[in-house]
Image (tube, helix red, strand yellow):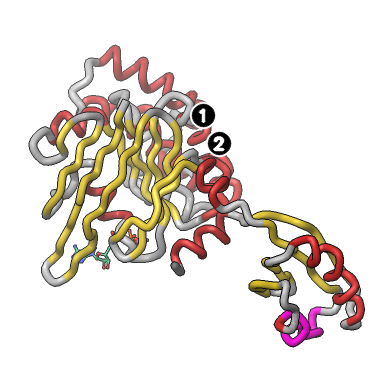
């Protein structure tokens, strides 16, 4: 099933082009990680996909429906949870879900069944009769997701679902997304790469309103398989700049904190020689290993061209 089809999507505000000719397609179930820095255009795209804003130009279809001409059908197939979902804090989760169900025009029995099922799925069952005002950030986010699913949508859109949460809250929300993506499409924006690496099946990277990359995580990794030698010295004050710059078989190297990453043009020579050279520099190795590019490395590579 084609879930999202964006073709030459453009969004202009008064004096600013927030989206420029954005095109991508998403098929089938799974989790899509929509990655980009501040101001990249994530929220603008999400508002268009959910029918909250209209594109200036281009064609956008969600679950086969046009977001402009078939907006009502789009909203009935899409569930949306903003970064900080808003509730009436005096209500309990049960009351809130029933109120939202009514807004969607669902009958009483369906609302009751969906409420039980979704509060259980989202881990709110035990707290369902307590006022929402006393919930943690993670519980509120999970309730926001439960609410977004009340009308049984095919696509769930989440705007930065874990950015404002503490580690425990993040963990619980990510577990929930992992469960949901087995049965539906979850489109989530974020700038936290570790989360995406853990749960996304497809990655889209957007920068300055332009899509730089849209690919399955598997394909992305396969196309960036590049061995890296990663090491750290016990003595962080030793500067290896001259040593590493002077080696012809090193194409590029980086240092972040005390950790060095070396990209070798001749891996065999590097593997045979680098440990001795490092020890000769007067240092001792805290660790030394052969690894491949992380999603963060790939992201930086793509974003920096
Ligand atoms: N209503 C608006 N009027 C004018 N410019 C806007 C409006 N909304 C967004 N923009 C601009 O459009 C660009 C994209 O904004 P958007 O909120 O989509 O980015 P984002 O990727 O969600 O960023 P962030 O992670 O900071 O929320 C930004 O430069 C922003 O300032």
Q: In this rendering, is residue 72 above or below 284?
A: above
Question: Relative to the observer, which residue lies in front, 101 or 47?
Answer: 47
Where's residue 226, x and y in %?
64, 56
Disc 1 packing (10 Å; few <14; some 14–19; many ≥20): some
Residue that appears at 47% across and 55% down: 164
Q: Secondary structure at mark 2?
A: helix
Q: State whether residue 125 appears in this view.
A: yes
Q: Secondary structure at mark 1?
A: helix
Residue that appears at 35% across and 32% down: 27
Quarter holding residue 109 = top left
The residue that label 2 is drawn on is 175
Where's residue 154, x and y in %?
32, 27
Q: With 240 as the anchor, is 217 left or right in this view? A: left
- Tag 2–tag 1 contact (CB < 8 Å): yes
| Residue 243 among those drawn in magenta | yes
| Residue 71 among those drawn in magenta | no
For residue 179, which numbered disc appears in the image?
1
Residue that appears at 48% across and 49% down: 162
For residue 276, which numbered disc appears in the image?
none
Q: CA distance from mark 2 to mark 1?
A: 6 Å
Quarter holding residue 105 = top left
Question: Relative to the observer, which residue lies in front, 82 or 287?
Answer: 287
What are the residue bounds of the magenta stretch?
Answer: 236-244
Where's residue 303, x and y in %?
44, 64
The quadrant of the rendered image in which ligand 1 is seen is bottom left
Q: In this rendering, is residue 252 above or below 216?
A: below
Q: In this rendering, is residue 18 above or below 202?
A: below
Q: Confirm if mark 2 falls within 8 A of ligand 1.
A: no
Q: State whether residue 97 appears in this view.
A: no
The quadrant of the image that shows the C terminus is: bottom left
Disc 2 packing (10 Å; few <14; some 14–19; many ≥20): few
């Amino acid at each position: 099933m084609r879930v999202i089809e964006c073709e030459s999507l453009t969004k202009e505000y008064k004096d600013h082009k927030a989206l420029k000719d954005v095109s991508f397609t998403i098929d089938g179930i799974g989790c899509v990680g929509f990655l980009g820095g501040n101001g990249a255009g994530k929220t603008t795209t999400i508002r268009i996909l959910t029918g909250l804003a209209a594109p200036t130009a281009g064609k956008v279809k969600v679950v086969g429906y046009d977001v402009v001409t078939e907006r009502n059908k789009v909203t009935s197939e899409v569930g949306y949870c903003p970064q900080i979902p808003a509730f009436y804090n005096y209500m309990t989760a049960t009351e809130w879900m029933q109120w939202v169900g009514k807004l969607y025009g669902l009958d009483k029995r369906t609302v009751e069944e969906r409420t039980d099922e979704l509060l259980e799925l989202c881990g709110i069952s035990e707290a369902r009769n307590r006022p929402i005002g006393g919930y943690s950030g993670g519980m509120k986010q999970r309730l926001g997701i439960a609410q977004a699913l009340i009308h049984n949508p095919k696509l769930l859109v989440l705007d930065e679902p874990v950015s404002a949460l503490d580690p425990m809250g993040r963990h619980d929300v990510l577990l929930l997304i992992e469960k949901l993506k087995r049965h539906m499409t979850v489109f989530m924006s974020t700038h936290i790469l570790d989360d995406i690496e853990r749960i996304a099946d497809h990655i889209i990277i957007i920068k300055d309103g332009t899509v730089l990359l849209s690919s399955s995580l598997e394909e992305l990794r396969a196309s960036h398989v590049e061995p890296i030698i990663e090491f750290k010295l016990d003595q962080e004050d030793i500067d290896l700049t001259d040593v590493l710059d002077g080696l012809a078989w090193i194409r590029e190297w980086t240092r972040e904190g005390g950790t060095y990453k070396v990209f070798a043009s001749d891996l065999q020579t590097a593997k045979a020689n680098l440990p001795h050279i490092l020890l000769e520099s007067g240092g001792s190795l805290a660790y030394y290993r052969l690894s491949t590019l992380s999603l963060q490395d790939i992201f930086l590579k793509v974003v920096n061209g």
